Amino acid sequence: MLDDLLGRTELKERIAALEDERDSLQARMEAEGERRRDAVRARQEAEECVNRLEDRIADLEGRLDRTDDAVDLEFRHRETISGRRAERVVARLESFAGDPESVCTAFLDGDVPAELEELLGSRTALLRRAMPCLVVVDDAGLLATALRAPVPPEPFLEWNDAPTIERAWFLPTGRFALALVRSDTFAFGVYEGDERVEFEGFESDVKSDHSKGGFSQARFERLRDEQIADHVERCEAALADAPDPLYVVGDRRLIREFDGRAAKTAAVDATGAPEHALEDAFDDFWTGRLYGL
């Protein structure tokens, strides 16, 4: 009652209301400050993104300019090489000689090093079209060629007085094994150079893709997959004691199963009876490409 008489009750209520208003305003200020900090961070992230995009655009524009410069460029020469022709090409490269550190040899499967791009100029676009490949160029411009190798080396770049090249990259050399794996066919040979000294082959009973008989589609596909899996297991067992290096060729879907075992895998279209198919597969595998830059 005394508070009422002195007017203190009204003052206390006013104070409480003002405190509530103060607290509300303070909360709004804090929230606004947090939003500003979020906005600053968002702006900074956006600016960083814009900078990255501008750098990427500049890089792509540069590549586009180089591509435009090379639109009319064509390979001086292109051909498929195998057998005797591959031997002659490799021998000719081996015979080339220059001054110390004048011949660059590189195996490329990605970016072109700046030193090669500077040497080739606009013809770098041709090199990119030929990759993955072995490239051999000299500083006098006498030699500029790229080759796709059946058994490519790991990426490298060297400057010497002659090309760095190994016949085993392009030609059947030494002792090795070649296996053909298709969904219903297996053929395997051990070779000494281009001469086959061992052979094994078999065919498996795998349902044809073209006829499912009285089976439902789902059951037919399941049975076919099981038969192919059994066939692949037979192939793996047959290759258990194969000499190294082992090259596995054939059906693109199945050769992946041998990535951990094979030194190289490659898709080929060789078909027919196992021995005949292996002969075709051998020819396909040991075929490369030659490009004049």
Image: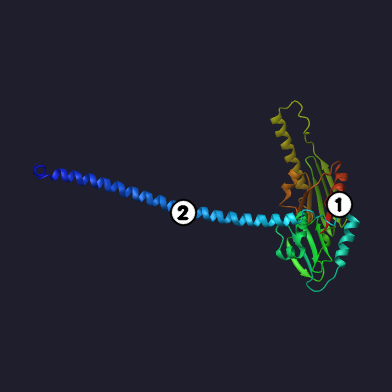
Residue, x 83% and y 54% (percent of image)? 288
What is the three-letter code of the residue carrying label 1? Glu
Residue 3 or residue 281, whichever sits in front: 3
Up-down relation of residue 250 to residue 161 (above or below): above
* Figure quadrant of residue 8: top left
Q: Residue furthest top?
A: 214
Residue 77 or residue 160, whichever sits in front: 77
Residue, x 84% and y 61% (percent of image)? 167
Residue, x 86% and y 66% (percent of image)? 94
* Colour scheme shown: rainbow
Residue, x 48% and y 53% (percent of image)? 43
Q: Residue furthest bottom?
A: 100
Mark 1, residue position: 198
What is the three-letter code of the residue carrying label 2? Arg
Is any atom of residue 157 visible in this view? yes
| Secondary element type, mark 1 | strand
Q: CA distance from mark 1 to mark 2?
A: 69 Å
* Figure quadrant of residue 142: bottom right
**1 or 2: mark nearer the eye:** 2
Horizontal relation, residue 34 to residue 79: left or right: left
Residue 99 or residue 173, whichever sits in front: 99
* Figure quadrant of residue 231: top right
Is any atom of residue 153 visible in this view? no
Mark 2, residue position: 41
Percent position (x, y) of residue 25?
31, 48
Percent position (x, y) of residue 131?
76, 55
**Local crowd at mark 2 within 10 Å, few (<14), some, or many (≥20)?**
few
Horizontal relation, residue 56 to residue 212: left or right: left
Rendered image: mark on residue 243: none
